[in-house]
Image (cartoon, coloured by chain):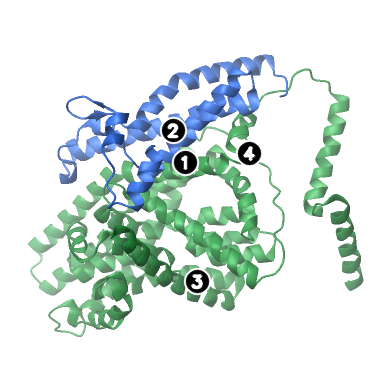
Amino acid sequence: MEELRKVLNEAKNRLIESFGLEPDVLLPDIRYRVIEEIVSTSIIREKVELTLTDVIDDAILNKYLGIPVFLSLAWMMFQFTFSVAAPIVDAVDMFFSWIGEIIGEYISNSFLASFLADGIVGGLGTILVFVPNIFFLFLALSALEDSGYLARVAFIFDRLMRKFRLSGRSIIPHLIGFGCNVPGVMATRTIAGENERILTAITNPLISCSARLPVYVLFAGVFFPDNSPTIIFSLYMLGIVLAFLISFVVGRFFLKGKPSPLIMELPEYSMPETRTLLMHMWERGIMFVKKAGTVILAGVIAIWALSNLPLGVKSVEESYLGILGHIMEPLFKPFGWDWRIAVSIVFGFVAKEIVVGALGMIYGVEEEALEHVISQTMTPLSAYAFMTFVLIYVPCVATLAAIKGELGWKWAIFSAIYEVILAYLVALMIMVIGGVMLS
Amino acid sequence: MDLLCGIVRWFMPARALPDLVQTSLSFDLGRGRVPAITLDPGMGLSLLVIGFSLLYGGLGSLKGKLKGGESFFLAGSILALILLVLQVLILFANGVETYALRIEDFSGWTPLEDLNEGLVLGLLAIPTLSSSAKRLRSLRKTGYQKD
């Protein structure tokens, strides 16, 4: 076996020396050349057949225009997700406010009324109002996927990604990560090279999943009302840039070897079908609603209990939650966050969506009033630092479990530690650089 | 200009930009300026990408080039059309917020505010897309000589 491997490696090296290409690239290249030779000698065509895909690809896959076109389409996707979904978000918000009022009016037992109004409606309601945004994001992603464009993104980014020790194929798990990091990490199985697979999996949590959306929508809407889609777009882009940088650093210093080449067949462009789009949107979006009914519901009930225990506390500040918040507060003082904001991030470890629900419960208000309260306690700069921190810090439990399942404990622990440190450093940089720019 | 001003305004909000950009790129209709200049870097980038594709593609197309000409023109026109559809949807959504839901943040909103540069460019791209589609259809019928 060892001898066979030696012979194989020698043959591989001879091929690389003679042709300057990896065998993985060389073999299909030669195969297609032979096919082209046979076709050109057996079929005579005066004119070349024209397909719409060939024409569009000439511009879309252009090495200078490809990435700007992708960025432009990504920005349009976020405009669609936030600006177009806004009326539905507001309607859902009005509904939960109405439910909260009804509970306050008809339930006389104050403990039960607090559990239902603050715990269930306040906690879960603040998260569920963002369901339309998540459905719209999945609708836009499905449209890009079904049109055939998303497959081309891997090709467009291959050249750039190889510089960061990744392959173009890494973009697929990263794009899946925009929905949820768990399938994103699992999708790294399709990457042939071991090093690229590790790098893609450990950087996938930096790709902003839909669970972070409620945090962004809330804070960007309050502090940057005129530019909220662009602010959210910047967070998504920051996540991508950081994922590339971390890949480069880890790949350069911890993992040796070159990325394997990208070979893929691009599908023809086609007009997405409305029925299929709606089906994809529903299948992916409903997962968020189910999660809200299980993990998130359990999380908000736990937070409600922590904010009301020990029994007889008069305010959240005196509760276990308040005590924990005051312990954490000094650590986040440089970012201008009070104990309430600091303690809310702890719950993001269970699921990132819970951060907003936790804030609603800590302040004891619903979404609309929450916007007013946080606008009084933070500046736009500290709010941006907070959104950045939520983007980067420790992956949720499910994502960590997926990394452990794919790569083992070592890489799962590594991911959790590097992300906390990175989140703190980036948030600090934002405060320092932003402070200088605004002064 | 939209992209540059958007970047400056976004990263350095303290550096107030002169109203020159607004006044030089739009017309005053009494109730508001048309097109409304958003000064958003994302919009700026989209306009730059579409503008470049149409210009480069248009020039190449005049020289009779399909690849590096007509193809860029078609891609630019499609992107402009997507931007137009998006702007119309946003206009509709803001209308719902104002007139149906009566959201406080939208009090005083008029449709003129959403008649922005993206919408205008999208409208202008409709004839370019239709002419590009016609040329490509005729090329598909006759076939074309490889560039």
Q: Is A30 drawn above or below residue B61 in the view shown?
A: below
Give the foreground label among 4 and 1: 1
Identified by mark 3, the residue type is Leu
Question: Does residue A93 appear to the left or right of A157 in the view shown?
Answer: left
| Residue A323 sits above or below residue B79 on the image | below
* Residue position marked by numbered label 1 in the rendering: A73
Q: Which residue is mark 2?
A: B82
Q: Are marks 4 and 2 on the same chain?
A: no
The image position of residue A246, as x and y in percent, is 55, 66
Disc 4 and disc 1: Cα gap in Å? 19 Å
Per the model, the C-alpha gap separating discs 3 and 1 is 31 Å
User: Crowding at label 3, few (<14), some or many (≥20) Cα neighbours within 10 Å?
Assistant: many
Residue A287 position in % (x across, y down): 42, 56
**Can you tell which of label 3 and label 1 is closer to the viewer?**
1
Question: Callout 4: few (<14), some (14-19), or many (20+) C-alpha neighbours within 10 Å?
Answer: some
Query: Can residue A294 be seen at all in this image of the molecule?
Result: no
Q: Residues within 10 Å of mark 2 (few under 14, many from 20)?
A: some
Pointers 2 and 1 in contact (C-beta within 8 Å): yes
Colour chain A is painted in? green
Q: Which residue is mark 4?
A: A267
The residue that mark 3 highlights is A400
The structure residue drawn at horizontal position 58% and vertical position 59%, both measured from the top left corner, is A187
SS class, disc 1: helix
Among the 4 quarters of the image, the one containing residue B24: top left
Find numbered disc 4 in the image and state the secondary structure of the residue it sits on.
loop
Q: Quadrant of the C terminus of chain A?
A: bottom left
Q: Earlier in the sequence, mark 4 or mark 3?
A: 4
The type of residue carrying mark 4 is Pro
Q: CA distance from mark 4 to mark 3?
A: 33 Å
Q: Amino acid at mark 2?
A: Ile
Chain with colour blue in the figure? B
Callout 1 amino acid? Leu
